[in-house]
Amino acid sequence: MAMIDYDEDLLFDLKRVYGDKLGDFLSSLSKPPDRFYVRVNTLKSTPEKVKELLENDGVEVYFDEVFEETLWIPVRGPVDLEEPICKVFVDKRTAESVMLGANVYAPGIIRLEKCVDEGRRVGVVSNNGVLVAIGIVSPGYREAIRSRRGLVVKILESLYRVPSLRDTRAYRAGMIYEQSLPSMVVAHVLRPRGGAVVVDMCAAPGGKIGHVYELVKGEGVFIAIDHSSRKINKMNQEFVRLGYTSINIIKGDSRYVDLFLGKEYADYVILDPPCSSIGVIPKIYDRKTIDEVRNYANYQKQFLKSAYNLLKPGGILVYSTCTTTYLENEANIEYAVNVIGYEVLEASPMRGCRGVGYLGRYLQRFHPHIHKVPGYFIAKLQKPAKN
């Protein structure tokens, strides 16, 4: 089980959602999803062709039961790893990626034991002492450490097994995009019409706006906004790989999006704001307080206000988070309806389960211990039409 350190008030907030199943939820945070999902880029290929390509590259892959463009790969594990003689210590984020098979790169390194050398078999250990993988030290590791970039450890065996897709023909050709199932549900809940103006307010890494772009075959105006230059550069590279030719990327603070794009500009808005990320799995450990969650919730309200101004009358907003707190989810939707003036619509298709509270019947949640996917929340809101 992950080392979870949430203060009493935060646990109380989570108990509003999970009740006497809170322990089951907390225990599930240390485990990855049962399935690794990919979305087929339907502008470049078909699910059938991509499945065949992946299988020819040795990947075990299946069709999703509902979404035609979605494939999934089984996640195997946990594996009993042999305790290593020599260790490489990595930060939390790196450890959580490596336990699913990612290699270790220089920025994630905390320290190396003195026994580490080129070609040496080593254990990769999180900064709180959890062994997550076994690997081989790269020949160029010294230069990688010096420059803070490049491969340090190539992973041989990880705690959980997910095949790497980056070297497959389907990935190199831009035919697939790695994306969680709940995140894919967002575009289906939005259901935009072709030719509309769609704005993704916190777009990086670009999966949601890209999914919408594919569903309407690139017909419309698409704007992806993010405040981080680094994330924008990565998103642009990804859009080039995928062949998206008409998604406009803007660097900006979306709390003021109505000021730089204009009021009543968008037909549809996607809002996945910064959050406490409690639903992200697997976790090596997690420490959070209710004050942090309150700060996130208040921050998210600013985006909800600017999105309302940005939308045309009758326009649609889909709000989503990768966290599971009541404050950042249902409480914010109650604020959006009662204070800002949105109307709430049903967040369908329903792949998860209903939310909680008096608006819960309209909302959608995913729970790691129930659905075996990351914890996630989705709401669909509408700006009232003018009389």
Image: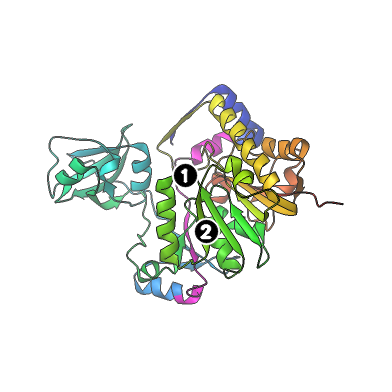
Residue type at mark 1?
Answer: Ile
Residue under the image location 27 percent in, 47 percent down? 104
Colour setup of the view: rainbow
Q: Residue 154: percent from the left, percent from the top?
A: 23, 52
Query: What secondary structure is found at the residue carrying circle 1?
Result: loop
270 or 72: which is nearer to us?
270
Q: Is residue 305 left or right of residue 272?
A: right
Residue bounds of the magenta highlight: 22-49
Which quarter of the figure is the N terminus placed in? top left
Residue under the image location 70 percent in, 53 percent down? 316
The answer to whether residue 377 of the structure is visible from this angle is: no
The answer to whether residue 69 of the structure is visible from this angle is: yes
Q: Is residue 145 left or right of residue 133?
A: left
Query: Vertical placement of 282 versus 110: above or below?
Result: below
Which of the two labelled residues, at mark 2 and mark 1, occupies the earlier sequence position? 2
- Residue that sits furthest to the top in the current view: 8
Res. 266 image quadrant: bottom right
User: In the rendered image, which residue does mark 1 sit on?
Assistant: 281
Residue under the image location 77 percent in, 36 percent down? 338
What mark, if any, has residue 293 been given in the picture?
none
Total labels: the figure holds: 2
Query: What secondary structure is found at the residue carrying circle 2?
Result: strand
Q: Is residue 164 left or right of residue 263?
A: left
Is disc 2 surrounded by few (<14), some (14 to 19) or many (20+) residues within 10 Å? Answer: few
User: In the rendered image, which residue does mark 2 sit on?
Assistant: 248
- Residue that sits furthest to the right in the current view: 387
Q: Residue 334: percent from the left, percent from the top?
A: 73, 37
Residue under the image location 54 percent in, 47 percent down? 202
Q: Is residue 45 left or right of residue 351?
A: left
Query: Vertical placement of 266 versus 122: above or below?
Result: below
Residue type at mark 2?
Answer: Asn
Is disc 1 surrounded by few (<14), some (14 to 19) or many (20+) residues within 10 Å? Answer: many
